[in-house]
Amino acid sequence: MRKRIGYVLLVIFILALAMGTGVFFWAKHNVPNLEPLARERIIEAIDDRFDADAQLQSLNVTLYPHPKVVGYGLSIRHKNWTDPQPLIYIRQFTAQTDYDTMINKRNHVDLVRLDGLEIRIPRRGGASLVKTGEEQGHEVDTGTPGQDRTQLKFLIEKIIANGAVLEIQPQMEGRDPLRFDIEKLLLRNVGPGRPMAFNAELTNAKPPGLIASQGTFGPWQRDDPRATAVSGAYNFQNADLGVFKGISGTLSSTGQYRGVLQQINVDGTTDTPNFALKRGGEPVHLKTTFHSVVNGTDGDTILDPVDAHFLGSEFICRGGVLHQGAGHGKTVDLYAVAPHARMEDILRLVMGGERPVLTGAVDFKSKILIPPGHEDVLDKLRLDGKFKLDHAEFTSPAVEERLLRLSDRARGVSKKEEQEQPPQNVASDFDGVFQLNNAVTSFSRLQFSVPGAAIQLQGTYNMRTQAIDMDGKFRMEATLSQTQSGVKHWLLKPFDKVFEKNGAGFEVPVTIKGTRSQPEIGSEIFHHRFTIH
């Protein structure tokens, strides 16, 4: 939604249309002779202002009860552009004032109304979007205001252009144009060679929601509209994220922007109190602050950074939402890190439940890629990263009890010594390197450890079917005989050397199959497979 703030601002250049229209010379002529002359002068002023070839179907001039000019079918084409559609088309425009203003303020118009305004920016203009990070340094070129060469100078108190349409052709062929329907547009104190103030409202298409913006625009760069300066603030409310497959929530955003249409700096915040994954767990309150650079003519957006918070976790993302190649749609291409994140927060978002099965601090780094398309977000999401959990704890007392027993056996603690120990939880460590593609997570390394023991795995987990297919090694510090006492200890003593490997007192292959809810853990010893229940 942030990238769309710049698009609507381009509409404001229509303000220059009325600058220099000769609406006051009617006082020296009678009406029948005035209309042809007025038509000629209006076309002359528009041609001068836009370096254009303008056509006007008809014009009506009235002096009673107040001076007014009404024009129909105005088309404006740039002289040096051969595009099939005009740069600007206005079904009807109306300029009016009063006699006191006309007499005492010669170059002054009270009100101009534009009905049926259509603006189409062709495939031409300045340089591409700036680079990110250190290369772009968060600075933006605001452009050099163009020298206004319009001969007729007028100040317009107010321009109203409700129901306007803005369509921007992308720089690369084969992509769909950007189209925006502007519900309300108000321009104030408009004059040539100066920025103009504006207020605008539009309904954003995707995600749907209302954008209100106010600021300044101009001076108009007639040879390259994309280099026209703009600045202001916006408020985006009640955006329904449910239009994106795989997520839901109602988003609001506020912020400020500055730059030129080709390159707009935007700083703002978003607030989604009910963000959720449709195939995940519970909704969470998601807040972000961001700095972005938006190409207001094709929507490409650099994010540097986005700082996201939910529950007690923080994620920082850098990258962009960009066209890649000549296809339709944009690709989300980010790199995310988690300087402060909790496993219980992630599990609540992904899996839900009153009590997350695991708690602990998470160190997470990953490349995030979401290509365009109509698939569910989780189906097309691609990740390439790693994670680490230190001193994590399971919330189930039964699981903690089993892990404590495992840790004691792996360290050679006898049953008698176990009974003498006070009740305690055992800290577990996790780390892994993974890739996610087509809803299947592939682990090149996944390690789980408690004091004295570790399981090292590799394999896959299917997010659709919850199927697990992993194999690896189970290692512990103690030898096989040290895990037992009494007669069993002496019976197993001869086998210690068989299972001692790579510095471990005991090492055997292990597999995990089945599903997340019904995993099957097994091992193969002397070519015989054993299932661990």
Image (tube, rainbow, N blue to C red):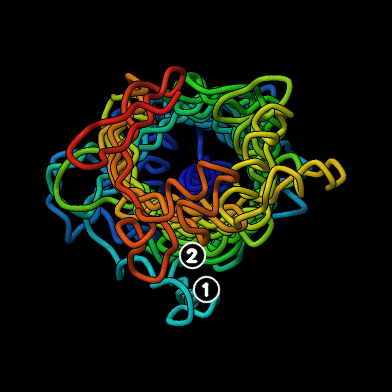
Rendered position, 430 above or below 203: below
- Residue linked to disc 2: 260
- Residue at 48 percent across and 47 percent down: it is 3
- Residue linked to disc 1: 142
Total numbered circles: 2
User: Which quadrant holds the C terminus?
Assistant: top left
Amino acid type assigned to the residue bearing label 1 in the image: Thr
- Residue at 12 percent across and 51 percent down: it is 82
Q: In this view, does 38 lie to the left or right of 171?
A: right
Q: Is residue 509 left or right of residue 488?
A: left
**Of label 2 and label 1, which has the lower sequence position?**
1
Along the viewing direction, whichever of 217 and 374 lies nearer the viewer: 374
Residue 301 visible from this viewpoint: no
> Is there CB contact under 8 Å for labels 2 and 1?
yes
Coordinates of residue 336 in the picture (x, y in percent): 50, 57
- Residue at 47 percent across and 71 percent down: it is 148
Along the viewing direction, whichever of 497 and 489 lies nearer the viewer: 489
Rendered position, 239 above or below 97: above
